[in-house]
């Protein structure tokens, strides 16, 4: 039996990052947003997580294609985050682009996640 409600995980497509600490820029932006960054580690996408997920959202088209190629049977649940809410465009990965790129990414994600939650809640009749 599945747990009710919405639960999300942030994972990446870079296997070499598995288990590493989040970047200092990520830590700083999370703190600015009032989110506790302690204990957060990088995690690589895997079959168990893909099986668990109802939807998989990516920031960049190349990541969407990577996941679909890795898990072709689950292609129907993989979307660009913007695509899922009826918009176009990608969100650039801020890695090694400085703190302002991380802030912009966080701002874009915050707006899109709000739209996603509204869409899901409307579908669930909440």
Image: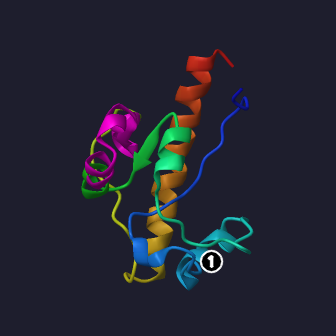
Quarter where residue 13 is shown: bottom left
Please tell me whether the stretch drawn in magenta is mainly helix, strand or loop: helix
The answer to whether residue 118 is left or right of residue 17 is: right
Pointer 1 residue: 27
Quadrant of the snapshot with the C terminus: top right
Q: Is residue 72 magenta?
A: yes
Q: Is residue 88 magenta?
A: no
Image coordinates for residue 83, horizontal then vertical, percent: 33, 38
Q: Is residue 3 above or below residue 98?
A: above
Image coordinates for residue 125, horizontal then vertical, percent: 64, 15
The answer to whether residue 103 is left or right of residue 13 is: right
The range drawn in magenta is 66-84
Quadrant of the snapshot with the N terminus: top right
What secondary structure is marked by label 1? helix
Image coordinates for residue 59, horizontal then vertical, percent: 37, 55
The answer to whether residue 122 is left or right of residue 36 is: left
Residues packed near mark 1 inside 10 Å, few (<14), some (14 to 19) or many (20 plus): some
Query: Residue at 51% across / 62% down in the picture?
Result: 106
């Amino acid at each position: 039996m599945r747990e009710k409600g919405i639960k999300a995980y942030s994972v990446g497509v870079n296997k070499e990052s598995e288990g590493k600490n989040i970047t200092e820029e990520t830590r700083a932006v999370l703190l600015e947003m009032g989110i506790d960054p302690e204990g957060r580690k990088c995690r690589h996408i895997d079959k168990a997580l893909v099986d668990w997920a109802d939807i998989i959202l990516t920031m960049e088209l190349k990541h969407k294609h990577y996941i679909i190629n890795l898990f072709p049977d689950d292609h129907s649940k993989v979307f660009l985050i913007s695509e899922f809410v009826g918009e176009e465009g990608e969100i650039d990965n801020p890695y090694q682009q400085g703190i302002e790129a991380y802030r912009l990414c966080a701002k874009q994600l915050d707006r899109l996640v709000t739209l996603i939650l509204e869409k899901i809640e409307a579908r669930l009749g909440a």
